[in-house]
Image (spheres, rainbow, N blue to C red):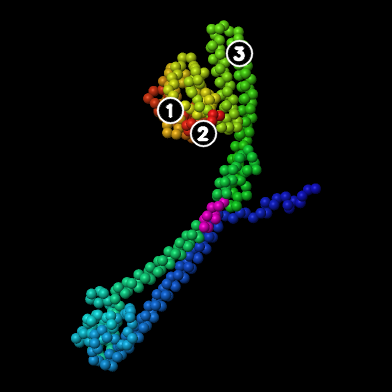
């Protein structure tokens, strides 16, 4: 029985996932509003507190000033210097003086006011004293024209109030900014979690296993990336399937002739004169080495299996790969931890390249450089121009082995693939004569390891 059409496509009615951009913009807007409100509240609290204390203190001192000034107005006789009305405050934010304008002398003053008159005559507005240490305001007595009142505040007091307000406001603003930064950092971490999820799913993605493809991304911006990864995985899977089919066919097509050559060589050894038998034996061994290298290469490209490594002495490999008319010398300072079949195929192709480019001598050397083993093959052949060598090196670094690449033939491409299968890479150092190829990969087995 067919299912209802309305339930056949539930994804079509599902709402789109939220957008990272929209969520971050919304978070930034709310955090900005909260930051502004908190800053305004904190600044208002600081200013209100400071102004409240200042106004209370000024109110107290103003009352004391008025009381003393009125007493001075009623009793014009000079009072002792430094005396004030009863209950004078211990801490004065303002000081006052009653000054005789005719003689510019202090008639009466607050306890902390200077003994000398701050201003010699009344002024229409507040102004700084001559020494610049007091901000003073004057007021004349209506009933005593010869006397005027001076109310002043010291520069140190004014600067202290300014600094206190600025420091409190700055500390409050920094606290709110830190809180906002922590809140924004938390929101950014929340929004970046889908990226981490996508990275983990891509890392676990195997194009040959469809169920491992990333799906259901929680953000709009990641949907095109998810789709592109899925499309790329499908193309890679199709390519791997085709290449595996080809290598399976190539393995079947190559193994039969190699097996036939081995049989024919075995019969030839049995029937050949004794003088030719050693050469036929070496030919059969070389054919067996070729079959092993072919199997190793097919296995590496079909299954990407780890190389079967062991400690190698290159002398035995080079003896089996001898070319007529090509003198091969070996200088081996350290043993190689490598797959013998893959290395034999690499050396065979490199030596064949040297012979095709009119080389007569090939120097093979093995050394250990820090933690790497370095295999160097250098000949005295035609070599190549510096620009060609640079293009070859660039192709090796970028692993471009296909059409349009500077890597012509199998030799260098195979050498780089084998070196990378061992965890290293191949390079083409410049030499004054001939051509040189250098293979490098981590040296030696792990401590306590055994031969494979």
- In the rendered image, the vertical position of residue 141 relative to residue 239, given as above or below: below
Quadrant placement of the C terminus: top right
Residue at (74, 51) in percent of width and height: 5
Counting residues from the start of the chain, the first of labels 1 and 2 encountered is 1
Q: What residue is pinned by disc 1?
A: 367
Q: Which residues are magenta?
A: 186-194
In the displayed orientation, state which residue is furthest to the right: 1
Which label's residue is closer to the chain start, 2 or 3?
3
* Residue found at x 40% / y 69%: 168
Q: Is residue 127 magenta?
A: no
Is label 1 in contact with label 3 (beta carbons under 8 Å)?
no
Looking at the rendered structure, the secondary structure element under dot 2 is loop
Q: CA distance from mark 2 to mark 3?
A: 41 Å
Residue at which label 2 appears: 448
Q: Marks 1/3: CA distance?
A: 38 Å
- Give the residue drawn at x 43%, y 70%: 43
Q: Nearer the viewer, mark 1 or mark 2?
A: 2
Q: Residues within 10 Å of mark 1 (few under 14, many from 20)?
A: some
What secondary structure prevails in the magenta region?
helix
The tag earlier along the polypeptide, 1 or 3, is 3
> In the image, is residue 193 part of the stretch drawn in magenta?
yes
Which disc is residue 282 wearing? Answer: none
Q: Read off the residue under disc 3.
A: 266
Categorize mark 3 by other alpha carbons within 10 Å: few (<14), some (14-19), many (20+). some
The span from disc 1 to disc 2 (Cα, nearest Å) is: 22 Å
Q: Which residue: 52% across, 55% down? A: 189
């Amino acid at each position: 029985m067919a299912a209802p059409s309305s339930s056949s496509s539930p994804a079509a009615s599902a709402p789109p996932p939220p957008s990272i951009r929209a969520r971050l913009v919304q978070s930034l807007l709310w955090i900005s509003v909260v930051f502004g409100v908190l800053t305004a509240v904190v600044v208002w609290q600081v200013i209100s507190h400071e102004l409240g204390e200042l106004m209370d203190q000024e109110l107290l001192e103003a009352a004391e000033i008025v009381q003393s000034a009125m007493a001075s107005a009623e009793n014009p006789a000079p009072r002792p210097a430094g005396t004030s009305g009863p209950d004078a405050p211990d801490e004065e934010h303002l000081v006052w003086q009653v000054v005789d304008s005719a003689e510019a002398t202090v008639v009466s003053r607050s306890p902390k006011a200077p003994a000398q008159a701050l201003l010699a005559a009344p002024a229409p507005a507040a102004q700084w004293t001559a020494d610049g240490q007091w901000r003073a305001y004057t007021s004349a007595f209506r009933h005593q024209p010869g006397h005027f009142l001076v109310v002043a505040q010291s520069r140190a007091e004014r600067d202290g109030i300014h600094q206190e307000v600025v420091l409190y406001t700055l500390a409050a603003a920094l606290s709110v900014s830190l809180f906002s930064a922590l809140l924004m950092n938390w929101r950014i971490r929340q929004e970046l979690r889908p990226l981490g999820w996508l990275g983990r799913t891509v890392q676990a993605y195997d194009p040959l296993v469809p169920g491992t493809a990333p799906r259901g991304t929680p953000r709009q911006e990641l949907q095109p990336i998810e789709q592109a990864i899925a499309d790329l995985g499908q193309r890679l899977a199709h390519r791997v399937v085709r290449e595996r089919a080809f290598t399976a066919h190539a393995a079947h097509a190559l193994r039969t002739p190699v097996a036939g050559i081995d049989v024919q060589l075995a019969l030839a050894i049995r029937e050949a004169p004794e003088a030719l038998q050693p050469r036929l034996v070496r030919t059969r061994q070389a054919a067996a080495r070729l079959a092993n290298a072919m199997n190793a290469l097919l296995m590496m490209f079909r299954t990407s299996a780890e190389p079967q490594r062991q400690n190698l002495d290159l002398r035995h490999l080079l003896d089996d790969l001898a070319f007529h008319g090509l003198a091969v010398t070996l200088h081996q300072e350290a043993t190689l931890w490598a797959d013998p079949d893959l290395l034999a195929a690499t050396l065979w192709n490199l030596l064949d390249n040297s012979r095709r480019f009119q080389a007569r001598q090939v120097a093979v050397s093995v050394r250990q450089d820090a933690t790497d083993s370095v295999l160097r093959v250098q000949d005295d052949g035609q070599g190549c121009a510096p620009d060609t060598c640079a293009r070859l090196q660039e192709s090796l670094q970028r692993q471009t082995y296909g059409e349009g690449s500077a890597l012509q033939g199998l030799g260098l491409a195979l050498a780089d693939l084998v070196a990378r299968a061992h965890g290293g890479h191949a390079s083409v150092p410049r030499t004054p004569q001939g051509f040189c190829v250098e293979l490098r990969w981590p040296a030696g087995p792990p401590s306590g390891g055994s031969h494979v």
